[in-house]
Amino acid sequence: MPYLNVVEVESALQVVAGTHPEFTELVTLPHRTWENRVCRAVRVASDLATARPTVVLFSGVHAREWGGPDILVSFLERLTAAAAAGTGISLPGYTVSAADVERITTGLDVVVFPQANPDGRAHSMHPDGDELWRTNRRPLPVGGVDVNRNYDWLWDFRRHFDPRALARGEVSVSDVRGQDTYHGPGPFSEPETRNVAWLLDRHPTARFLADVHSFSELILHPWGDDDNQSTEPAQNFRNPAFDRRRGLLAQNGHPDARRYGEYLDPTHRRHLVEIGERVRDAVASVNGRRYTVQQGAQLYGTSGTSDDWAFARHVLDPARPVVYPYTIEFGRERPEGVAASFHPPYAEMARIIDEVVAGLLEMSLAGLDRLAAEQLP
């Protein structure tokens, strides 16, 4: 079975929504892509008239990471089929009971947005395209923008990060047009990032988020700019006193690494790790692949990413609920090379789909448990 193309992903969403109109909503996002494509998501909820705590799942941000949309389409099809039949979901080594499927659909709004960057995906998959294309398809003279460096969180990286970290390439972002990590002409300059932001604005009760990428077998959580710390609240991304100090990570051996660490509330830190570990264990139960739970900066420094931006919304406005966000990097490096690592043979991809679907189901259940704990006196 080949990877789903852009048209097939779109068709799958419409089929699911058309098959289960009583508990799904086909959502048309407001911002057309540069190549004039319309993006859609599906909302799953037993009561579509009532807003409940929301899980936002999206993928296909980086064009060459072909498997993400397939994962989310499979997740959506399995969840809705089970909800309609009143059954559970069985995967190799991992099962969700019918009662837990009902818990998910009655306790949460689940919003599934499989292909955030359809222009890039179409170009990467086209026989005359570039299979390793990463960015969107913004036309020249600007050219492609890395959608996951375009969010309004430390976007102006030269102001926020230490020049030494930038000079050594320890922060994965660029302001040079044509680079794979080019952050764009301004924050939220791209329709793809604005669509994700719109989803969170449309669902102000959003509490959990997963941005599905490849590859590395990682479950990443905030923060992505520097080492986390929970003792110095003044050291935070809003404080200009620490501009040009961020990004000197301890793992890179910088003598000044401890001059700054990104503050993370210890309670939020514990919850991020707890949920992430449940996702990890569910993934491992399927194929034995044990993903690593870690903060984003332990992969490399970043700015303008979806998970940090989503988490920062509560920091900037405490009236908003905390969103617990994750970047899931599925799959591993393959000896055949980079292209095979980003889109492995589909027999392997099918196994990866099962394990990540299990992880996303468990994230939903862990989210419900977290919400229940918050209601305790």
Image (spheres, rainbow, N blue to C red):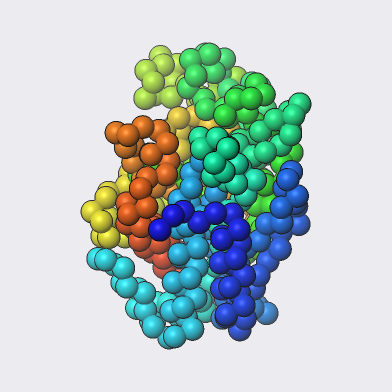
Question: Which residue reaches farthest front?
Answer: 127
Across and down, in percent, residue 136 comes to 64, 39
On the image, the x and y values in percent for residue 76 come to 50, 68
Q: Which quadrant of the figure has residue 102? A: bottom left
Question: In which quadrant of the rendered view does residue 91 lie?
Answer: bottom left
Q: Is residue 146 left or right of residue 281?
A: right
Q: Position of residue 186 (x, y in %)?
A: 74, 33
In the foreground, 301 or 146 = 146
| 57 displayed left or right of 138 | left
For the question of whether residue 64 can be seen, the reply is: yes
Q: Is residue 211 above or below residue 81?
A: above
Compared to residue 239, the image places residue 44 above or below, namely below
Measuring 65% from the left and 45% from the top, which residue is drawn there? 119
The image quadrant of residue 114 is bottom right
Quarter occupied by the N terminus: bottom left
Q: Residue at x 27, y 66 (%)?
A: 92
Which residue is painted at 45% across and 38% down in the image? 296
Task: Determine the residue located farthest toward the bottom in the rendered image.
Answer: 86
Of residue 193 and residue 324, the one placed in the foreground of this image is: 193
- Residue 222 lies, in percent from the top left, at 49, 42
Camera-side residue: 309 or 317? 309
Please give the count of numbered marks on the rendered protein.
Answer: 0
For residue 270, say whether it is visible. no
At 52% across and 25% down in the image, what residue appears?
171
